[in-house]
Image (cartoon, grey):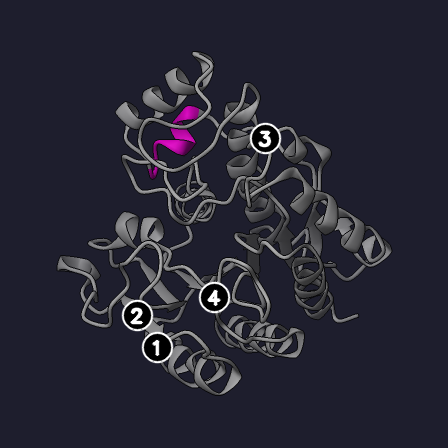
Amino acid sequence: MKEPRTALLLDAVYRKHDTGEGHPEAVSRYVAVTEALEKLAPGFQALTQRPATEDEVALCHTRGYIATAKRDIRSGLTNLTTGDTAVSADSLDVALRAAGGVCAAVDAVVTGKAKNAFCAVRPPGHHATPARGMGFCVFNNIAVGARYAQKRHHVARVLIADWDVHHGNGTQDIFYEDGSVLFLSTHQHPWYPGSGMPEERGEGKGEGRIHNFPFPAGAGRSEILPVFQKHLSEAAAAFRPDLVMISAGFDSRAGDPLGRFRLTDTDFRDMTLAMMEIADRFCGGRVVSVLEGGYSLSGLAAGVTAHAKTLAGI
């Protein structure tokens, strides 16, 4: 039997989300990612995207918000009424296929058809809260994937780590009182969206399951890498995840126009290795990584390449 390989979700459908001229979260981002990953494609197992069902999206978002997003997009608005997210005629379908694509990756990894997976999807998702699309995000792709893993595959505990330069406020909000999901975020502060302080640790069953590490502009390897290699490793030992997920934002890379961190491609490789080591220890190496931000086209391509190559061991 062939050894399961890293699965890659890369699909032209994600180019159809049109944010308009001059927007940072542009189609050109996906072109840059595609050109980088197509060079590596022979080393990967191809994943097929699918749209998430409304019931799957409702695992993380209110029915009222889902209806609002549908109405806003179908009425021809160019921005969601809930926040700073540009949309176009195809954005609802693309957003559903981003969330559904992550669910397809979960299927592949949890069932052993793939060793791990990288989902190159857009729009990004980690700012989308239960009742609000914001920060370029429509639906919270990684959160939907985590809940889907729990509901469809009876995965008990999911670890989500977010190294985007912006705090994953939506993911935090969705799981703040949950307890079955451990969420860790490294992010620039003060910076958009303004949340993610260390004292935000979860409530109720979620108390102690939220781990926030805000750093000032200029932070890089010496500040951020130990969070993954030491703190997260220790937290994972107490939590014992059944699935590891990554909100892989590359706007934390040096030179990104929307961030002031100084991470390098080597740092993304080493953070990826730290996540893989946690997964190897506790859940048979099961990692599902999901693209978030990254707005320097060359930087995004380089960071994604380093991350994907590490996942695939190439």
Which residue is the extreme one toward the left?
A: 204
Q: Tell me which amino acid carries mark 3.
A: His
In this rendering, position of residue 32 left or right of residue 197: right
Q: Residue at x 77, y 51 (%)?
A: 45
SS category of the residue bearing label 2:
strand
From mark 3 to mark 1, how far is it between C-alphas?
Answer: 37 Å
Q: Is residue 166 left or right of residue 190?
A: right
Q: Are marks 4 and 3 in contact (CB under 8 Å)?
A: no
Work out whether mark 2 precedes mark 1 in sequence or the reverse, and give the earlier one.
2
Q: Residue type at mark 4?
A: Trp
Mark 2–mark 1 distance (CA, rounded to whole Å): 9 Å
First along the sequence among labels 3 and 2: 3
- Give left or right: position of 299 versus 204: right
**SS state under label 4:** loop
Residue bounds of the magenta highlight: 54-60
As measured in the structure, the alpha-carbon distance from the residue carrying label 3 to the one carrying label 2 is 32 Å
The amino acid sitting under disc 2 is His
Task: Tell me whether circle 2 and circle 1 mark residues in contact (CB < 8 Å).
Answer: yes
Q: Please identify, in this view, whether the residue under mark 3 or under mark 2 is nearer the observer.
A: 3
Percent across and percent down for residue 122 are 57, 41
Residue 158 against residue 284 in the figure, above or below: above
Callouts 3 and 2 close, C-beta under 8 Å: no
C-alpha span from label 1 to label 4: 16 Å
Residue at label 1? 235
Please name the residue that numbered disc 2 is placed on: 211
Residue 154: percent from left, percent from top: 41, 48
Say if 271 sits above or below 127 in the image.
below
Q: Which residue is mark 3?
A: 17
* SS under mark 3: loop
